Amino acid sequence: MDITGYANIKTDAIGAGVRANMVSSFQGQICPVMEFASDGGALVLNPTGTALGSFEKGQIHRSFKCTMHGDVVCPPDMDILSRMVYHTKCMMRKGGYGPIVRQMVIAASIARGEFTDDFIWQVERDEQAAKAQAL
C-alpha cells in the first residue's frame, strides 16, 4: 500500500481497531494516510510505523491528499511518469529536497488542508524575476 496523504489526528481521537495502549501514538500526530474513505475518514499509520488505525472524519483535525515518489511528497493524482519528472525537479532545486523540506511541505499542506509546495520554489521565482528585471 502506498501513502495517499497525511492527516493530523485530534488529541482526543479514539481509532477503530486500535489497541488501547497504541491510541496515544496517533493522538495529536501528523500521520501518513494509507487510504481515504469516501465519508472523509482515513486508514492511517502512526508516525513510528508500528500501528495502523482507522479514524472517522470527526477525529481528523486536517488532512491532505498526495502521492509519494521515494521520499518526495508529490501532488495528488500524478501518474508515474509525472511523479518521476517532479521528483527530478525537486532533487535539482537549489537547496535540494531533504527530510526537513519534506516535513515543511507536509506541515504547510496540513495547515492549508490541501497539497502545497509553493514556498520551496520561491527562490527560483525570485531569481527569475530579478533576471527579467535586469534585462
Image (cartoon, rainbow, N blue to C red):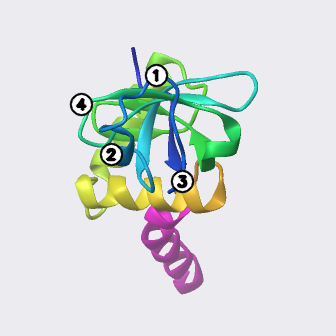
Q: Residue at x 50, y 57 (%)?
A: 11
Label 4 vs label 2: CA separation? 9 Å
Q: Please rate how many residues cluster around mark 3, counting C-alpha atoms within 10 Å: few if below 14, some from 14 to 19, many from 20.
A: few
Element type at mark 4: loop
What is the chief secondary structure element of the magenta stretch? helix
Instruction: Report how far apart the C-alphas of labels 3 and 2 lie in the structure.
Output: 12 Å
CB atoms of marks 4 and 1 within 8 Å: no
Q: Which residues are magenta?
A: 118-135
Q: Residues within 10 Å of mark 4 (few under 14, many from 20)?
A: few
- Where's residue 99, x and y in %? 24, 53
Which-is-in-front pick, marks 4 and 3?
3
Mark 3 or 2 closer to N-term?
3
Q: Amino acid at mark 3?
A: Asp
Residue 20, compared with residue 90, is above or below; it is above
Name the residue furthest right.
Answer: 39
Q: Which badge, 1 or 3, comes first in the chain's sequence?
A: 3
Give me the C-alpha separation between circle 4 and circle 3. Answer: 20 Å
The residue carrying pointer 1 sits among few (fewer than 14), some (14 to 19) or many (20 or more) residues within 10 Å by Cα, namely few
Q: Position of residue 56 (x, y in %)?
A: 65, 33
Q: How far, Cα to Cα, is label 1 from label 3?
A: 16 Å
Q: In the image, is residue 1 above or below residue 9?
A: above
Q: Secondary structure at mark 1?
A: loop
> Which amino acid does the dot numbered 2 rest on?
Ser
Identify residue for label 3.
12
The residues tagged by marks 1 and 2 sit, at their Cα atoms, a distance apart of 14 Å
Q: Is residue 119 magenta?
A: yes
* Image location (x, y in percent) of residue 80: 45, 17
Q: Which residue is labeled 2 in the image?
A: 25
Numbered badge on residue 50: 4
Q: Quadrant of residue 76?
A: top right
